[in-house]
Amino acid sequence: MPTTLGQNQYGKAETRVVRITRDGATHHIKDLNVSVSLSGDLADVHHFGDNAHVLPTDTMKNTVYAFARERGIESAEAFGIELARHFVAGQEPIHQARVRIEEYGWERIGTGDGEARETGHSFVRTGQETRVTQVTYDGERWQVISGLTDLTVLNSTNSEFSGFARDRYTTLQEAHDRILATDVSARWRYGWTGGDEPAPDWDESYRQAKKHLLQAFAETYSLSLQQTLHQMGARVIDSRDEIDEIRFALPNKHHFPVDLEPFGIENVTADGAVYLAADRPYGLIEATVLRDGTEPRIPLDLTHL
Amino acid sequence: MPTTLGQNQYGKAETRVVRITRDGATHHIKDLNVSVSLSGDLADVHHFGDNAHVLPTDTMKNTVYAFARERGIESAEAFGIELARHFVAGQEPIHQARVRIEEYGWERIGTGDGEARETGHSFVRTGQETRVTQVTYDGERWQVISGLTDLTVLNSTNSEFSGFARDRYTTLQEAHDRILATDVSARWRYGWTGGDEPAPDWDESYRQAKKHLLQAFAETYSLSLQQTLHQMGARVIDSRDEIDEIRFALPNKHHFPVDLEPFGIENVTADGAVYLAADRPYGLIEATVLRDGTEPRIPLDLTHL
Amino acid sequence: MPTTLGQNQYGKAETRVVRITRDGATHHIKDLNVSVSLSGDLADVHHFGDNAHVLPTDTMKNTVYAFARERGIESAEAFGIELARHFVAGQEPIHQARVRIEEYGWERIGTGDGEARETGHSFVRTGQETRVTQVTYDGERWQVISGLTDLTVLNSTNSEFSGFARDRYTTLQEAHDRILATDVSARWRYGWTGGDEPAPDWDESYRQAKKHLLQAFAETYSLSLQQTLHQMGARVIDSRDEIDEIRFALPNKHHFPVDLEPFGIENVTADGAVYLAADRPYGLIEATVLRDGTEPRIPLDLTHL
Amino acid sequence: MPTTLGQNQYGKAETRVVRITRDGATHHIKDLNVSVSLSGDLADVHHFGDNAHVLPTDTMKNTVYAFARERGIESAEAFGIELARHFVAGQEPIHQARVRIEEYGWERIGTGDGEARETGHSFVRTGQETRVTQVTYDGERWQVISGLTDLTVLNSTNSEFSGFARDRYTTLQEAHDRILATDVSARWRYGWTGGDEPAPDWDESYRQAKKHLLQAFAETYSLSLQQTLHQMGARVIDSRDEIDEIRFALPNKHHFPVDLEPFGIENVTADGAVYLAADRPYGLIEATVLRDGTEPRIPLDLTHL
């Protein structure tokens, strides 16, 4: 057969694991969706159905649960590192492991009115962004790309779009005071690659990166969503030494001022306006911002999965 | 033709309206998804395609935007009341209007570290539950059913399930300390029907109802999800005089302790456990709780839409 | 506590069962999603967490699988009837059972070019509509409501919308040749209620009802979507004696001719046009058509679940 | 600022265009979802908000509609080529255009029973797979990657999984007769790069590739999903000279035989069995198959978007 087998990988996707840790009456929760992918010396299974090098994906699922119990889940990143190391170290034919994790946030339910009381075991899902990470390990070096998806933000002013290029099909009017809204999908790559370097404090790094993304979005007077994107990326790179690269996919969630002239109503005035929140189509802005001197390694579509 | 036309209604569904109100540099946002449905003397359009009694659904969309601009959006309920009144009063053949609204929550983005600063015009979507309402008006009486969907909660202890009925197909083991988790979908009906009664403070009522739902969920030692549901409903009826009836659809989001015995690991211990968060199938508990002496009027499937 | 427990039910939702029947080398597949709901003497579980009358939802899941194996799945309706009878007959406190089923269609994969060959065991999902049914049984009488969802149809001509009512907010232009498109959601109620009557041939009835819906949609010259809906319903009632009532929810999936005048292009001409397929908002037309002399019993929102 | 701008692109995503072509009473329909992405000399908009090189995404939307009207839609691929050429040729700062298109299939509604009649203007959406393409053009060379998503297939026998690797966490039993089911997501790259070569017949190529995928799936006696994947890929490469490379992401949609022993029922017998169709987790098999001597160019995650 005149064909060659190219890149291939296999694994177990979307193992949903919840870990409850009890510290007396105070419980803690970790809620993850874990996808493992392995690659290596796997030609024979493709060519002949020879499974001798194929650790079942069912085993990967078991391992996720066993590791969650035995080693705990300190952070999504630390958990992914444990898993990736295990598969590469434990299976000789496997040369690389990639672990993708989604993490869902929970906060405690407050009870009592006057004072802030909690049961210690009652939680409500935050529902805001989903935290994500991808850990890759080839037996020597680590790559950790973390980020978030579906963080929906909106500025009701301080956004313009003008001075743009035009062609025969251009009908858009310039806008000097518009709504700017997007669902932030961001992935940042940590400089850490293992060896003697101490690993970052993954949770603190995540909290700070999210904070900087939000603040840069809020504080930028925007002449284009590209400019806002760049400010958000540069703010993270500037503020967080452990992060070398960040990539975004930002849909431009259009909010069009509704034309109410036919009804004798002036819509856009000093005291506000009414907007149509559109679904499709939407602008889509994607870009990478890098620390000077580093190489880009975040795959172009990773923000889009 | 030996057929009869039964109940019928028509309208414009899912008009997405965002209202920004500017109070100097401080902006406020309301973000709604509005669905209008009208019924009345509409037999001729069904039988003959005679549209003389059919106000276009496009007009309903225009009205949503125009009303949002001219009258503002005090609350989802108040906005629904304005719209419903308008269609019944304005179109002689229309005898009833039903307005369903979903509302998405936003909070302000804080900027600055040491002190709580805000831009006044920057928002992040809360992402937690969706607030909903349904306003119905027949020209004389009002019915307002409000509620929420997708409020995901979890108790990591204080939940049992035992002493249940058994038959030939029963294999379930009793559980004396399990996770109880659900996505709350609730609809409550206000006693208010218009006339001389003052309308409730819709926003305060919503905040309080949500608070009571969360606290009753957290504080109930649960022998079954039905019991928890009933406690949640009774708490709202007890605490809020303006609410006469509440109905729930609560999926039992199963979290199964994983069997780690094959790996020599004891999973469920005093310091916690690891759970498989299952997707399907799921238990589904539905019930209505009523103030004594009131008639149930919330449709059985309304919590399920 | 000054509250009353209203209507309540509980069950197992979305048990996904696939039944393969082997007739030598020729296999047959049934692919269902089954939701069971029981009601009856269940006050104590709500009030006190007393589960003595509560057959676990886990048992319902087991029963679905066991019945699928022992009794086979002749049709979704017949399977639902078996299940409903079992729960009402087997559990004294249970007074009513409701079984909702979704069925996914599969067709055989053809192999070989010149002649139509098949492996007998290879299938591809049709992907078109989802067939649904709801069987309700109270120990005496049966109600079977079947139907379909997500059957997307489009007429590229023979549709108008004109002569409509107008008010201050009407800007819509009349349309004398427009696209009419909808996702058909229909539920029809069979007259059969058990007893000595023979049950309909559920599969043949489904095939015929779907055929009539499609043909009535195609053949109606439409002055409004309401008229098309009515024709579809009347055709089914006229053609199928076993069906007494049918209800529809038909979104008007707007396809707007794009204004290409700014580019010097005439869009709508005798040889066709280009349309923007809009997402939201959409018109929504709902109505019931009944056989003369029958009572409407399909819940208003059932087509909308 | 010590940062560098990396790869960036912007465009309009998900423009929904429907083209009706009238050939007398016989109409034809094309239904696309078009996403355009441009890259080039765009640093200034990121750094300074200077939009001089930024053709508005609104203009891209207009262009999609205008081209659909003026030039027609011969195939998704041909339409993508027209669009990509236009943007690269028309905008000096733009160096590359990528057009992604989803195409939804429609078939005609038959009317009349005895003979196959059609209205010529009535369609029902097929609902099966979505056809996709990605056209990339840098002013010199073309790359066309086409494929499909969500083609759900199932073999009810002729599938095994045994002889696999084991470790401490392996509990899976060998299976010698199991269901094999997957949602095929495939992308194939055409060898055509423009210049003097004639372009393939895109529609015929698509039909043939889909046919070969289905037949290879049906005809392979499978020892692993990897082997089936490889057979599917090799079949396409072998059969279609115009295709040089194909990549798959195949979820292993697990169908577990249900354990009915507790009820005294033998489930898996010569006349069939009952299966639990699981949602998550699922195996995920990804691989590329190449014509000998060609370079892989399909991005690893493209099948996963």
Image: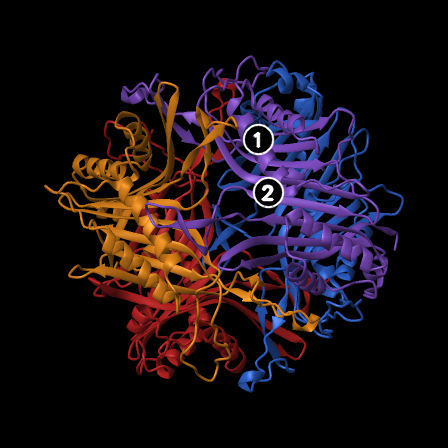
Chain colours: A orange, B purple, C blue, D red
Is D96 located above or below residue A151 in the figure? below
Which quadrant of the rendered structure holds the N terminus of chain D?
bottom left
**Chain on which label 1 sits:** B
Q: Position of residue B7 (x, y in %)?
A: 80, 48
User: Image point 32% across, 37% down: which residue?
Assistant: A57
Place residue C212 in its image quadrant. Answer: bottom right
- Would residue A236 be visible to someone looking at this image? yes
Q: Amino acid at mark 1?
A: Leu
Q: Which mark is residue B213?
A: 1
Q: Amino acid at mark 2?
A: Glu
Q: Residue furthest left?
A: A196
Q: Name the residue that disc number 2 marks.
A: C103
CB atoms of marks 1 and 2 within 8 Å: no
Is C112 located above or below residue A197 in the figure? below
Is C22 located above or below residue A302 in the figure? above
Q: Position of residue A13 (x, y in %)?
A: 36, 42
